[in-house]
Amino acid sequence: MEHDLSSAPFPAWPDVAPDLVNVAAGRAPADTVIRGGIWVNVHTREALPDHDIAIKQGRIACVLPDAGAQIGPDTEVIEAKGRYMIPGLCDGHMHIESGMLTPAEFAAAVIPHGTTTMFTDPHEIANVLGLEGVRLMHDEALMQPVNIWTQMPSCAPSAPGMETTGYEISAEDVAEAMAWPGIIGLGEMMNFPGMANADPQMLAEVAATQRAGKTVGGHYASPDLGSDFAAYVAGGPADDHEGTCEADAIARMRQGMRSMIRLGSAWYDVETQITAITQKGLDPRNMILCTDDCHSGTLVNDGHMNRVVRHAISCGCDPLVALQMSTINTATHFGLEREIGSLTPGRRADVILTSDLKALPIEQVIARGKTVSINGELTAECPHLDWPTKARQTVNMGDPKTAADFEIAAPEGRNSVTANVIGVVENQAPTKALKRDMPVSDGKVESHGDTCQIALVERHQATGGVANALVSGFNYEGRMAMASTVAHDSHHMIVVGTDRDQMALAANRLAEVGGGITIFRDDEELALVELPIAGLMSDSPAREVAAKADQMVQAMTQCGCTLNNAYMQHSLLALVVIPELRISDLGLVDVRTFDFIPVLEPTT
């Protein structure tokens, strides 16, 4: 599957083919020559010493043992000095908004880590601003010095009837977006029950994508690998990143899908699935590495796709196979094998120089033939879009909240109740459906032990709505509350707390600053991360956002939380397409059955 990139901001191969041919033949000088490196060829899984790469017009003209004939008086010569020359890393599935950064600032954060290509699904902003938001993300993505392709979001809302979004994405929106220059396919099809039941809108979105010759992204979050899974695959999704065990990876690959295995800030799904390759010996060409969700702290402190590749290697994967899973496999999946993903003629000159294939230090990054980072320092400009006022005024929750908005009323005369409780699972996207006996005071259910309150505050249409429930696993102590306008996927406002007054303070604070994350304890604000763009992103540099995010994590710890990457767990508690229990603006959702259930069990 090949894509017409003639309308993209980077010149297409046919437009520069004469120059490439002349350079390769030694009749014209290259713009740049990388000399004396070990050529990592991901097509043949070889590391070939003593090779040069000649670059013209941002594309590779040739890879030869000696490109001296391609060096002219104005040719830039980069000395590899025996280091490995590997393709720029590709992230096969990710959400820029999860970094709490705009596309420009996200690119600036990940380029020094060797990521030169991203396949992004902006369904977070789609839920807040609709097609207009997607276009803004798409347009800023195309301005960057690296490759950012956009998948048109498929599911806003992610589960129709289970939640209310700021905007809804239609099949007509999908068809329109398929003509945009940076759209590479359809974003993850999260409505897996709809697909399995032949929902007309879901099938129409897939059809519009396939007729455009583009790739349909998958999201099958059910453990059932029987007929429902078969029906889902038959509908058209070509990949899936929701697997958590070896059987999931094998099932997807056997059905002709690409198994995308992820290491994000909170998802650790590589180690349990890569055994399909390392132990079972299955063909690795159908497995792809990705991040899905990485917050700014991870990007600044730990890395991006380089972190994922290192982790795969530490799990026993051959380094060259791990590189295939983060380069050529990804490119091939999206129909871009002739454009990116390898160091071969005609491809975009996206090159990393590294002295060690296992430790993978990212010593120099070249994107489209230009050096964009040296030893972890960004050397390129990442241009910003002028984000409109509408995108910066998205927290509309009506009147200020009070403690009364967060009350859960108990049946009259009861001093305790049995409640359905969302159980957080560390380092996993799924939650557990728990039952807890909860105390009652003055007719209201109170927090107790490791179980506290959770609320979803409507913030798109100013309805004033607040849905209340209970959550377990954060281990919060004292009088505290945490609020966030990052609330996948409908992105209302999630408030979790042990005290209703603190919950009201936190909610009102986010309305005041236009969105973000805040933590209050004993009437004092311990941390604030401002996210003024759609309540999801900041256009400040990643290091500044990460510093505030670090303070937020420290504040969570101060309040008693011991979970790893607890913020990611917090932000996903409204994601009503991942089992078992979630909260939406309409109530408590049992995702196993896609039914609403009561917070309190009926009295007998």
Image (spheres, rainbow, N blue to C red):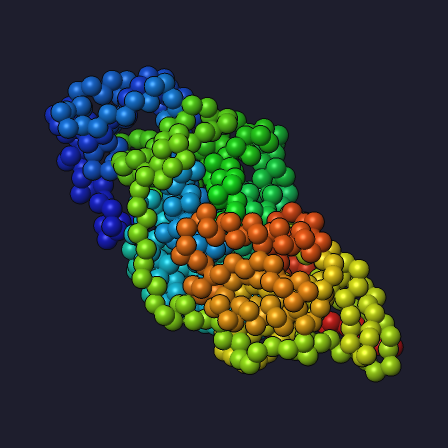
**Is residue 237 among the parts visible in the rendering?**
no
* Residue depicted at 47% across the width and 61% down the height: 531
413 or 142: nearer the viewer = 413
* In this view, 536 is above or below 35: below
- Does residue 146 appear left or right of residue 395 in this picture? left
- Does residue 257 appear left or right of residue 11 in this picture? right
- Image coordinates for residue 361, horizontal then vertical, percent: 45, 29
Residue 55 appears in which quarter of the rendering? top left
* In this view, 216 is above or below 391: above
- Image coordinates for residue 528, horizontal then vertical, percent: 54, 60
Residue at the extreme bottom of the image, as rendered: 412
* Residue depicted at 60% across the width and 77% down the height: 401
- Does residue 18 appear left or right of residue 85 in this picture? left
* Residue depicted at 61% across the width and 70% down the height: 505
- Image coordinates for residue 155, horizontal then vertical, percent: 49, 64
Which quadrant does the C terminus fall into?
Answer: bottom right
> How many numbered tags mark residues here?
0
* In this view, 320 is above or below 423: above
* Residue depicted at 35% across the width and 36% down the height: 373
Residue 40 appears in which quarter of the rendering? top left
* In this view, 168 is above or below 381: below
- Image coordinates for residue 160, horizontal then vertical, percent: 54, 70
101 or 477: nearer the viewer = 477
**Is residue 27 among the parts visible in the rendering?**
yes
236 or 156: nearer the viewer = 156
